[in-house]
Amino acid sequence: MLRAADDAARTAQKLRARQFEPVLSPVLEIVATGAQLPQGAYDAALASSAKGVELAKGADAFKALPLHAVGERTAQAARALGWRADIVAGNAEAILPLLLARYPRPAHFLYLAGRDRQPTLEAGLKAAGHLVAAVEVYEARAATALSQAAVDAIAAGAVEAVLHYSRRSADIFLALAKAAGIIEKARAALHCALSQEVAQPLVDAKIPNVGVAERPDEEHLLELLARRVA
């Protein structure tokens, strides 16, 4: 389990409910940047992760705006904090056409963003003539090593599968496994990726057993795991 600590703890509960025993090794630490949200006449807010709404500083002034969310988990976090979650879709590629249909004329979006992110959403909106004020309210810092529990389990051949939630975390995992001298053992495991984009570093590294969830959400990722690991 490579997710940041809070997310990993929630996923670990789901795995145990499915009779899997998780080994946790967060490769990213999520921290707030403290960035202030700029005042402006916005038509809507955007968030591509729960951390975007949870760590946004001074957000109360903007909660009357509709918030369009990538992922149901993001939408749930937004509603819990008083946002009016509106359009919700599983990834940037899915939400972009919905936004373009909702806003046929140029609109101004406030984007509660992470420092390391894919450009798909912003680039697509800007290409259609929209304004996007992206505020980096959090950053994901890379871990310097895998947890000792993960290193030991992988080295012993006890890890059957590795779950990958982002392209960056997949890249970091591969680098840390190589640094720990366990990359060949890690290659023998099943690697389950949230999307084809997430899977790409694994494919590029010629990992032999890579699976991609049918839809880019955790439930479909866990369903993939359940199907592939007897």
Image (cartoon, helix red, strand yellow):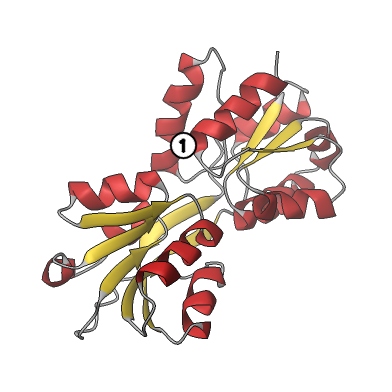
Residue closer to the observer: 14 or 71? 71
Residue closer to the observer: 50 or 137? 50
Residue at point 46% right, 60% down?
A: 95
Give how far across and how far down residue 163 sits, in percent. 62, 36
Give how far across and how far down residue 109 sits, in percent. 33, 77
183 lies above or below 99: above
Give left or right: position of 177 versus 53.
right
Give left or right: position of 171 versus 127.
right
Residue closer to the observer: 49 or 29? 49
Residue at point 60% right, 30% down?
A: 149
Quick one: SS at disc 1? helix
Q: Residues within 10 Å of mark 1 (few under 14, many from 20)?
A: some
Give left or right: position of 89 versus 204.
left
Give how far across and how far down residue 125 sits, in percent. 47, 77
41 lies above or below 124: below
Residue 28 visible somewhere in the drawing: yes
Per the image, the residue denoted by label 1 is: 8
Residue at point 42% right, 49% down?
A: 71
Give how far across and how far down residue 221 sits, in percent. 58, 34
The image quadrant where one finds the C terminus is top right
The amino acid marked with disc number 1 is Ala
Residue at point 52% right, 67% down?
A: 117
The image quadrant where one finds the N terminus is top right
User: In terms of image quadrants, where is residue 189?
Assistant: top right
